[in-house]
């Protein structure tokens, strides 16, 4: 395994695969903060040159956190599909990049090898790809899942309706929910981030959302994004729960900071299987985001893109219905500005899809990051063009509880109209019936909450 | 002069699971074909080239390809044109891929050209850089050989074919003299040396130029 | 382009035909304008908006123009964004602290950008500031090399800081500081030298509090602005401040501004919190909040949405 490259006569040598992966990464303030980034563009391209010639087998044999020290590495290695890996393991990262870009490599083929890829492989390919490369492959990948409706079909763009409220006041939550539905949003999930993390309030909100869905016969799912242990207690109280949520990260240590482990997730998934209220086989919902491992000092000297991919390696174990990166939420110390947030969103979507996940994205920024509203709107179009499964949706994109800027109800409708995308087939039929979205454009009752009971 | 005259596709239909009698009647083999794709078009030769292209892009077989008497101007109906092509394959996806290739070729490649600036004399001087299974079987050449597929009205054709054969190192595979269903005449040429694409191109260019010359000065 | 088409194009060119080839689509015709266009009248007061406003500050019932916002909504939205962005961009002037009677301190961050990108630097005092704190602040007696015994200094060390909104710090910060100081004094708690820290993150309270030997450190700092709110402060309190404390050991109150929790309301709660910490000897998750009325470990009051854009007729 060669770990050096010569750029214009200067030979640059790297100590480990982990260092090569980190230094090959596109510039990110979080990698600078961790002290793992390339010192200049020349060193970055040297690392990429080395990476291009490593084989996928090399990457499997050199995970960024050792097998015996990290349960995420163990989940990935023990769960790897030997036959799928055998098909691609001999390729170098450079050859793999070309193979996935090749038009004859179809979405079906990519899906068939996904189970043989480790997160480090997805991250490695990502580092050799430009934004448009990431979009080209992302758009090819097809990951279709089912809960109460069918998510991830080609030509679709779904949305999570996020009716957050600073005090979890149920009538306020329902006001935002009704409005979002009237704008054609919420086919991925109606998912609330609670202000109060208790089983009782989780159950109360789920019952209220369930009531709206039942009365209006809306084919979607609900979820309250409290801590997974809180949701388990709520489920034990006997409330309806279509999807179970948890934030996850790419190392055991970072997950410990979230108060979770593989054992706990296994237990939660088993409980959902027994008591969850969805019809389909996919019942879990995970959120991730570059930088979360560093913020809990559990990054093991690896870069944030590779660690992010490892979170997807963990998510894969549970055949989730939804996975999304909350790309700009973490702040400028990890993703400094519009270009870095845009890049990270496209990277995360690509890696998640390549690893076989129904990847969505919370395209967002906090007000102390250097990103403009126009840049954020552009990012939503890029993501939708790249085949992103779903985006968030809030009133004017403003989260009044978490204080950040994301996708609005209007944005979802605009992107669908611009790119000719529609909601999931079940939900789209409901929108058509209600006159909310008809024939690829706003219908007569678009934005009219009067259509809902 | 020599502007492309684009073929119009008149109907495209799929039969995912065709009955055995229909399969047999149109030359398919029920033991290996399940699905059919049907296409009609107002230029028979363009469609034949396009069907041949489909055999390169997909596992389809061209089981039927017949021109209708007196051509598109005297068609039996609005959707008939002057030719019916039938693709057969093991499953609907193969048919879909075959039809996609056929339509692409009709839109972007095979077509007649205007030889007199008025559209009253036309020529089909088509070069296939690598022939597919359909025409290769009909002409007895190896799949992948370059050929020139040359069509013109009866008199123009004689002059032009002579010019084409003299313009490059080519030989004829098949010559069809009138009367034919559409009353055009047709010849298929290939290089004397296998794989000689340049010779086919030179022959097709000379053929087209000669038809134009005849069309401009028909009596001198 | 197909091979045959390009051959024919060459032949055509060789024979002197230069007219453009197909496609020769006719250019679209520009229609004559209508006599006058009308914008459909929009409801200026939406019943949905009014009904929703009783329950949430989310911008509901704003209608739509096709799939986009009406102009009024765009302007209000941009004004709210502008408020948030200008609050983040503002810097605390170097002389402000001293002019307002605070001992001026600064973290190890040396520029605003570095402060945003390096949270680690914002959590530690610059050496000059550390020296100033040791020289000029009221501190408990020393027990070893610069180590202070817990509680040897003041009961409460109050720290005002810029955080992510210098505007909030310079706005209601001073008033909240004074009110909290008075509320602590009213409960019989001693309060240390007033300090104001620039480029400060929450955890800076650990180093400052430890240096002066305070029992409780409370930092009042500008919070990350939200849409339309650039002047909010958060307060974080910790018992036994020392470097290495985690967030689980802190209690916080946020949304402290005129439209959220006003200073005169927040100050007594903070003093009550400090008193409870001293009485129980803990803070954070372990602190029993029963009867304190501080509204939970992370209390957040609902806020009122302001109309920011008024277009003069």
Image (cartoon, coloured by chain):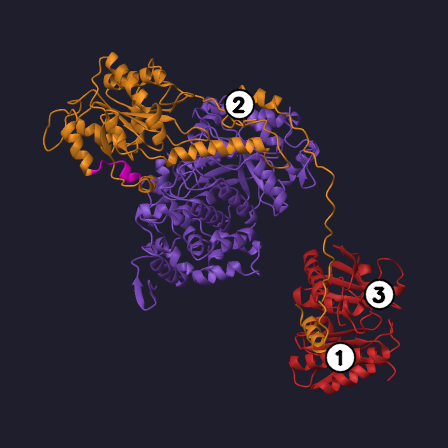
Chain colours: A purple, B red, C orange
Please tell me which of labels 1 and 3 falls first in the chain.
3
In-front residue for pair B194/A411: A411
Nearest-to-viewer mark from 2 and 1: 1
In-front residue for pair A108/C68: C68
Classify mark 2: residues with Cα within 10 Å, few (<14), some (14-19) or many (20+).
Answer: many
Q: Is mark 2 on a helix, strand or loop?
A: helix
Per the image, the residue denoted by label 2 is A172
Per the image, the residue denoted by label 1 is B209
Labels 2 and 1 share a subunit = no
Q: Which mark is residue B82?
A: 3
Whether residue B144 is visible, yes or no, is: yes
The residues bearing labels 2 and 1 have C-alpha atoms spaced at a distance of: 78 Å
How many marks the image carries: the answer is 3
Q: Residue A371 carries which label?
A: none
Q: Is residue A444 magenta?
A: no
- Range of the magenta residues? C119-126
Residue A109: percent from left, percent from top: 55, 56
Residue C104 picture quarter = top left
């Amino acid at each position: 395994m060669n770990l050096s490259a010569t750029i214009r006569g200067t030979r640059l040598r790297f100590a480990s695969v982990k260092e090569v992966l980190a230094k090959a990464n596109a510039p990110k303030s979080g990698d600078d903060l961790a002290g793992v980034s390339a010192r200049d563009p020349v060193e970055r391209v040297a690392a990429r040159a080395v990476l291009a010639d490593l084989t996928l087998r090399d990457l499997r044999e050199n995970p960024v956190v050792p097998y015996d020290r990290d349960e995420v590495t163990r989940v990935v290695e023990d769960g790897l599909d030997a036959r799928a890996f055998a098909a691609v393991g001999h390729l170098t990262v450079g050859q793999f990049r070309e193979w996935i870009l090749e038009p004859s490599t179809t979405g079906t083929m990519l899906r068939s090898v996904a189970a043989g890829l480790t997160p480090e492989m997805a991250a490695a390919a990502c580092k050799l790809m430009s934004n448009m490369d990431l979009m080209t492959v992302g758009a090819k990948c097809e990951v279709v899942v089912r809960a109460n409706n069918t998510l991830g079909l080609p030509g679709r763009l779904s949305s999570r309706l996020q009716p957050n409220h600073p005090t979890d006041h149920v009538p306020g939550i329902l006001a935002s929910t009704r409005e979002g539905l009237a704008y054609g949003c919420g086919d991925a999930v109606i998912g609330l981030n609670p202000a109060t993390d208790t089983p009782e309030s989780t159950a109360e909100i789920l019952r209220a959302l369930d009531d709206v869905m039942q009365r209006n016969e809306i084919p979607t799912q609900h979820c309250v994004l409290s801590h997974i242990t809180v949701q388990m207690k709520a489920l034990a109280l006997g409330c309806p729960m279509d999807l179970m949520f948890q934030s996850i990260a790419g190392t055991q240590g970072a997950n410990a900071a979230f108060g979770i482990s593989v054992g706990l997730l296994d237990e939660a998934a088993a409980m959902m299987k027994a008591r969850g209220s969805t019809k389909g086989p996919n019942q879990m919902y995970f959120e991730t985001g570059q930088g979360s491992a560093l913020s809990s000092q559990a990054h093991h000297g690896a870069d944030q893109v590779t660690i992010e991919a490892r979170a997807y390696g963990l998510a894969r174990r549970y055949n989730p219905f939804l996975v999304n990166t909350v790309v700009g939420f973490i702040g400028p110390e990890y993703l400094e500005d519009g270009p870095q947030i845009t890049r990270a969103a496209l990277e995360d979507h690509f890696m998640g899809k390549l690893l076989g996940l129904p990847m969505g994205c919370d395209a967002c920024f906090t007000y102390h990051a250097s990103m403009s509203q126009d840049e954020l709107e552009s990012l939503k179009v890029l993501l939708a063009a790249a085949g992103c499964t779903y985006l968030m949706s809030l009133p004017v994109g403003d989260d009044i509880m978490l204080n950040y800027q994301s996708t609005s109800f209007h944005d979802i409708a605009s992107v669908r109209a611009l790119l000719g995308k529609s909601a999931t087939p079940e939900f789209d039929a409901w929108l058509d019936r209600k006159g909310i979205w008809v024939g690829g454009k706003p219908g007569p009752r678009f934005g009219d909450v009067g259509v809902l009971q | 002069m020599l502007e492309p005259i684009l073929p119009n596709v008149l109907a495209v239909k799929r039969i995912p699971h065709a009955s055995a009698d229909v399969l047999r009647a149109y030359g398919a083999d029920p033991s290996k074909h399940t699905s059919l794709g049907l296409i009609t078009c107002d230029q028979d030769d363009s469609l034949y080239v396009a069907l041949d292209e489909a055999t390169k892009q997909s596992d389809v077989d061209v089981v039927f390809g017949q021109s209708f008497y007196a051509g598109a101007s005297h068609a039996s109906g609005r959707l008939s044109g002057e030719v019916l092509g039938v693709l057969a394959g093991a499953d609907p996806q193969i048919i879909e891929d075959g039809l996609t290739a056929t339509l692409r070729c009709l839109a972007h490649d095979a077509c007649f050209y205007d030889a007199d600036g008025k559209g009253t004399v036309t020529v089909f001087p088509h070069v296939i850089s690598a022939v597919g299974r359909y025409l290769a079987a009909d002409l007895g050449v190896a799949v992948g050989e370059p050929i020139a597929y040359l069509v013109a009205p009866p008199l123009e054709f004689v002059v032009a074919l002579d010019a084409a054969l003299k313009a490059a190192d080519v030989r004829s595979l098949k010559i069809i003299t009138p009367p034919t269903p559409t009353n055009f005449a047709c010849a298929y040429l290939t290089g004397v040396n296998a794989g000689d694409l340049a010779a086919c191109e030179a022959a097709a260019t000379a053929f087209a130029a000669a038809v134009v010359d005849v069309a401009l000065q028909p009596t001198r | 382009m197909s091979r045959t088409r390009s051959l024919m194009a060459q032949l055509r060119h060789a024979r002197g035909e230069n007219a453009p080839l197909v496609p020769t689509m006719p250019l679209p015709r520009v229609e004559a304008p209508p006599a006058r266009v009308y914008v459909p009248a929009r409801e200026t007061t939406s019943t949905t908006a009014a009904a929703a406003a009783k329950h949430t500050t989310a911008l509901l019932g704003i209608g739509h123009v096709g799939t986009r916002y009406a102009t009024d909504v765009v302007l209000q939205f941009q004004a709210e964004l502008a408020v948030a962005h200008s609050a983040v961009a503002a810097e605390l002037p170097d002389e402000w602290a001293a002019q307002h009677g605070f001992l001026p301190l600064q973290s190890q961050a040396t520029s605003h950008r570095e402060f945003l990108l390096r949270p680690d630097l914002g959590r530690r005092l610059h050496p000059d500031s550390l020296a100033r704190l040791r020289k000029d602040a009221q501190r408990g007696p020393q027990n070893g090399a610069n180590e202070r015994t817990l509680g040897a200094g003041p009961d409460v060390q109050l720290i005002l800081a810029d955080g992510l909104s210098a505007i909030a710090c310079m706005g209601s910060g001073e008033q909240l500081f004074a009110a909290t100081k008075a509320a602590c004094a009213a409960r019989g708690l001693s309060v240390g030298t007033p300090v104001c820290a620039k480029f400060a993150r929450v955890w800076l309270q650990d180093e400052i509090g430890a240096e002066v030997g305070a029992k409780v450190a409370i930092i009042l700092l500008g919070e990350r602005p939200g849409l339309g709110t650039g002047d909010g402060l958060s307060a974080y309190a910790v018992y036994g401040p020392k470097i290495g404390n985690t967030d689980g050991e802190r209690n916080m109150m946020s949304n402290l501004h005129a439209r959220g929790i006003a200073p005169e309301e927040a100050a007594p709660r903070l003093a009550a919190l400090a008193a409870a910490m001293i009485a129980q000897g803990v803070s954070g998750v372990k602190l029993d909040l029963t009867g304190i009325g501080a509204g939970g470990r992370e209390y957040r009051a609902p806020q009122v949405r302001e109309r920011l854009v008024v277009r003069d007729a």
